[in-house]
Amino acid sequence: MIRSRILGVGRYLPERRVTNLDLAKMFDTSDEWIRQRTGIVERRFADEGVYCSDLALEASREALKSAGMSAADLDFVIFATLSPDHHFPGNGCYLQPKLGISGIGCMDIRNQCSGFLYSLAVADAFVRIGMYRRILVVGAEVHSSGLSFTDEGRDVSVIFGDGAGAVIVGPSDDPARGILTNHLHADGAFADILRLEMFDISRKPCLTHEMLDRGSLWPKMKGKEVFRVAVTRIPEVIDEALKAVGLKVEDVDLFIPHQANLRINQFAAAKLGVPEEKFYSNIQQYGNTTAASLPIALSEALEQGLVKPGSLIMFVAFGAGFTWGASVIRW
Ligand code: ACO
């Protein structure tokens, strides 16, 4: 059986740092409130004029370099984002010419915080059936253009940051190494708990001044409900993924969880009886970068020597939809 593995990893974070204190100058919040509830200290914001596909380009270049490849070697692109350059076409189509290539297939996956995980599972399946051999999977977000920096929007706007991460997925030359299993879930009964209305396609036209006036441009979240379901689903899917490969939590060298909220990950680690340091964490510096958070974290963990050949790692994510999932990888 062909197994797929991650051949290269890259990340890109915009340079502009925005601290909690910077936010507290814009609306009624405090460093203490944000740190206590989310763990976030600062996040990065892209400058005016920068597209999501621009951040993705930088991360993709780094991933290609680390795989020892050029963009011309790619045979497919999967782009995960909730903040695409425009409503359509998909961001893969905006990224492709920036990479200097054309002709290969490009697909967007709109699964928010689980977007990268869903994309990785699709890439894995494409490689395993022999359809493609060099797939760029990129997660990128420019949240800072779509947040309400006001007292009304503060519960959401303190959480998110901009960034991009990318991996190259291809066949593994060692059947023992690579992506071992993927588990994807969703429960659309919670679709309205965390969403951005933006437009309503049942209305003609689908976007009106009245809708903009009542804030349809800004994401809305019932934070407590997100927290409550996340801390149940994350340990559950970790358990499910480990059972599928006949391993135990102790066998995992590093959990790489989506960086939604430090408290969610601490809660999940405690529930599983896993020491906190085995749950990778960088939300302090970047906030929640949604589809970009897993590949950014993987890229850092590799640099820090936390992931080595033979390490067993697990990606786990939970987000809007609700959607959630986990992947187990033998590095
Ligand atoms: N600064 C200061 N005060 C605030 C802020 C803020 N940024 N936001 C809300 N408050 C106030 C509220 O108005 C409320 O005031 P009140 O008591 O006078 O009414 C008070 O703080 C408490 O508000 P809650 O919403 O009850 O705060 P809670 O303790 O639930 O924390 C939080 C909010 C951090 C969002 C929490 O619910 C949470 O972490 N939920 C998980 C959400 C999450 O992780 N989302 C990201 C994942 S989503 C994804 O990845 C797609």
Image (cartoon, rainbow, N blue to C red):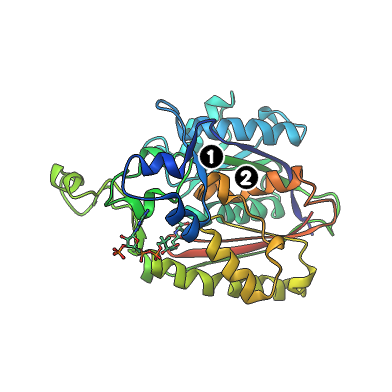
- On screen, residue 90 above or below 298: above
Q: Residue at x 57, y 45 (%)?
A: 285
Q: Amino acid at mark 2?
A: Ile
Which of the image's four quarters has the N terminus? bottom right
How many labels were placed on the picture?
Answer: 2
Q: Does residue 253 appear in this view? A: yes
**Between residues 172 and 31, which one lies in front from this camera angle?**
31
Q: Secondary structure at mark 1?
A: strand
Instruction: Give residue 240's position: percent from left, percent from top.
Output: 64, 74
Instruction: Give residue 45's position: percent from left, percent from top.
Output: 46, 36
Tell me the quadrant of ligand 1: bottom left
Q: Is residue 78 left or right of residue 133?
A: left
Disc 1 crowd rating (10 Å Cα; few below 14, some 14-19, many 20+) is: many
User: Do the numbered discs 1 and 2 sit on residues whose CB atoms are within 8 Å?
Assistant: yes
- On screen, residue 292 above or below 89: below
Task: Identify the residue position indicated by label 2 in the image.
Answer: 296
Task: Identify the residue position indicated by label 1 in the image.
Answer: 163
Question: Mark 2 or mark 1, which is nearer the start of the sequence?
Answer: 1
Disc 2 residue lies near ligand 1 with CB under 8 A: no
Q: Residue at x 76, y 48 (%)?
A: 171
Disc 1 residue lies near ligand 1 with CB under 8 A: no
Instruction: Give residue 280's position: percent from left, percent from top.
Output: 67, 56
Q: Residue at x 57, y 36 (%)?
A: 13
Q: Amino acid at mark 1?
A: Gly
State the CA–CA distance, disc 1 to disc 2. 8 Å
